[in-house]
Image (cartoon, rainbow, N blue to C red):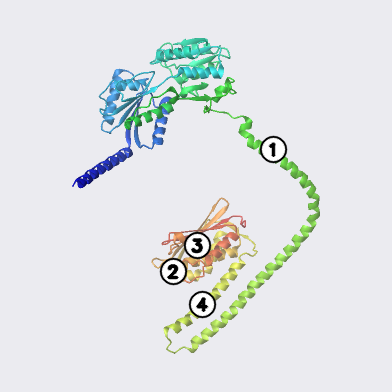
Amino acid sequence: MVRRSLIVVMTALLALLMGVGAASAQESAKPLRVLVINSWDQNLPWSREFMAGFESAQEASGQPAQLYVEYLDSGRFSSGRDIEEFLSFLEAKYGTAGIDYVVAESLPAVTALDSDPGFLPGVDRIAVASGGAQATTADATVPVIADYGASVEELVRLQDPSLLVVVADTKSPGGQQRLDGFTAALESSAPDLPVRFNVNESVSSVASSLAQLPDDAAVYYLLVFQDADGAPVSSFTTLEQLSAASSAPVYSNWEILLGHGIVGGYMISAQLVGEQTWDTMLALRAGQPVPELEADDTYRNAYDWRELVRFGLSDEPLPPGSEVLFYRPTFWEQYWPVIIITSLVVILLAVLSVLLGISNRRLNRQQDTLEAAVAERTSELAHANEELEQFAYVTSHDLRAPLRTISGFSTILRHDLEGLDLDEDVQGSLDEITGGVARMQALITALLDYSRLGGEYEPQVQAVEQTVLAALQLVQADLDAADARVGIDIPDGLTWRVEEALITSGLVNIIENSIKYRSSERPLRIRISAEQVGDRISLTIADNGSGIAPDQIRRATKMFQRLTTEHDGLGIGLASVQRIVAHNGGTLDLDSDGHTYTTVAMVIPVAGVRS
């Protein structure tokens, strides 16, 4: 009894564990719905780089997610009323979307989220805050630590300036905090470095001042968002103006400024901040301790090669793992494979020229012997061709003689047996003999004609319409018997240079195919048209017959390829036509749907250049 109870309890526990495991697996496979609220405009580099890192970490984790991104644009809409309306808009938009996490990126978005604790109730909040700011309503905080000290140390290591000029403004939000943090770090990292501050000055005034700096000075850009008169300015545009005017290299703490005039150095990366934010969210979701971030977690060394070269710093060693942007390789680095190959080619040509000079005399001596050998071989080849053609005629004659004998005896046998009550097998055997002899005779004739197509012919200029009419005249009786109608659409005066007898033979073959494979459901209609396109003439014969199956079109021009057993044939006709067209330097194109039409196009050069 006790054992049975124990089994029941263990079974229940196992089922519970399996249910928990299944629920956990189902939960991990469920896409997370994450709303990211950026403080700035979506076109600013910081916002773009943050989202790039956030999405990169999401893909690397394998956790499916649906990301929704909104932008506070705090530079233009910073009043309490603006923030209230923005959050109301987001509440209406995402209130029923099943959001799992809200990420507030940078201080304005964090402040806005703290102002409304009831925004999207029940949704976990993650704050990305800089300057030691604390988010009162956040479930987790990703601190953006400004390591000005290490940034200045890398500046001093790279350049060792005689003077450091700091450009900043304290009128914009966070400006005074940045300046205080930098000043404190400077006193600790480089207490003996002479420093001059240009704070809250006009851009033009600062530019004039930087233009007069000594070569061994350095400039540190702490961001400028407002001009001296309080008017908002673009931090990136301001940097570009100051860097262009400065006679000394410009440094900064933000990687997103690379490419706008700073040398680079040890800087905070918005992409790394985005990656750390995703990892923090996953830790919060798993119920694990939120990782405590250090400055190194979001900093890396990056440099603008153009600025390094501009100020003579390109020869200075960079820290391992540094990223160098806009690198311009030297002439040797860029073209060393071409230089090496060219040198080898020149050496090889020199060697070859010597060898050619040595062998030239030997070649001259051999030339007469070679010309005599070529003449002799040409004569032998011509003789061999004549013998081959004679062999074809003799072989066809020798093959036809026994066939005629078989045909004669089968006719006599059929005559002798007339009037007798023959069974179906005997009658069928006689029919097979007669039909086989006829097919063999037709095959020998067709093969002989096919072999002649490679001979020599003289192309002549001929009107296309005249060639077509000559072919129609040869098959007119068959056309009349089939009650076929032929339409001709050929421009007047259209000519080509072809071997007329061969082309006429090919046209007859195509038209006879149209007659043979006509449809029993409709009267036969044939349309023959021609046009000149560039240096080629396309002659098209289209009918409304039973057609060729599309998957059989490629086989239609192969030797002995019969596509149907409903009609007699040898499978040589279209192969001969293709060889005729190729002999005139052209191509043969077929098209059909297998039911209602067949189109055959001869595309031949106007000048009749042979392939």
| Amino acid marked by disc 4 | Gly
**How far across and down, in percent of the image, does residue 449 sit?**
59, 69
Can residue 298 be seen here? The reply is no
Contact, CB < 8 Å: mark 4 with mark 3?
no
Label whose residue precedes the other's in the sequence (4 or 2): 4
* Residue matched to label 3: 555
Disc 3 or 2, which lies upstream in sequence?
2
Front label number (1 vs 3):
1
Across and down, in percent, residue 5 comes to 20, 45
Q: Which kind of residue does numbered mark 2 sit on?
A: Asp
In this rendering, which labeled residue sits more in front, label 1 or label 2? 1
Image coords of residue 166 (percent x, y): 48, 13
N-terminal label among 1 and 3: 1
In this rendering, position of residue 561 left or right of residue 82: right
Disc 4 from disc 1: Cα separation: 72 Å
The residue located at (45%, 60%) in the rendering is 551
User: What residue is pinned by disc 1?
Assistant: 343
Residue underneath mark 2: 483
